[in-house]
Amino acid sequence: MVENVDQIHIGGRLRHARKIKGLSMKQLSEITNCSESFISKLERDKVQPSLTLLHRLVAALDINISHLFDSDRADEEPAFIVRSGSRPRIQMNARANSSGVLLEQVVPLGPKSLLQVNIHIVAPQGGGHEAISHVGEEMGFILEGMIDLQVAGRTYRLTAGDSFLFHSELPHAYNNPGETPARVLWANTPPTF
């Protein structure tokens, strides 16, 4: 269940990254093919981005999604522990009037991290973002529910216990065709998204 979740507000981090990059809202809106007013609303946490838009934003800002999570870990620690119920979460809406996808960060990331791991909690009929591609490799394990995974124009129906692996350079997207939330343990390397 994903109700009553303390979500991370990413607007301030997006605004900071945009300013560090030296871009105006208008310039960022042109690069990401998004309206300037929507960028303004994102930066004020009035709206949530789709997965596709979030991917375009982090690419334009030369950051990755982990930059948007609050990570106060010390790089000199030999092991990093994240307790159940205390994982940072970001809600993304894939389409209008949809609960979309909730990303729950499984492990903290640092500048030397080679692997990014999240749990994608996909609402019933959620997902549905445009296909994206980027450098790397991805694997996942369906913990609960089902998803339709699209990779390079092919669709694969996956249910609890199924796993997948693909090269991130191939256009890919996913959605939950079911009536219950799907939970997917999703890892990618490098942590580019």
Image (cartoon, rainbow, N blue to C red):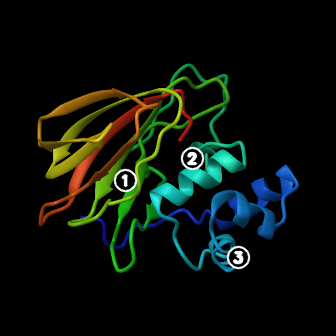
Q: Residues within 10 Å of mark 3 (few under 14, many from 20)?
A: some
| Residue 69 visible in image | no
Separation of marks 1 and 2 at Cα, in angstroms: 20 Å
* Amino acid type of the residue tagged 1 in the rendering: Gly
- Where is residue 150? Give x, y as percent: 27, 44
Task: Tell me the quarter of the picture where residue 96 sits.
Answer: bottom left
75 vs 95, nearest the viewer: 95
193 vs 53, nearest the viewer: 53
- The disc at residue 65 is 2
- The disc at residue 17 is none
- Where is residue 63? Give x, y as percent: 68, 43
User: In percent of the image, x 49 and y 56: which residue is there?
Assistant: 52
Separation of marks 1 and 3 at Cα, in angstroms: 31 Å
User: In percent of the image, x 46 and y 31: which residue is there?
Assistant: 169
Label 3: state its secondary structure. Answer: helix
Looking at the image, residue 164 sits to the left or right of residue 64; the answer is left
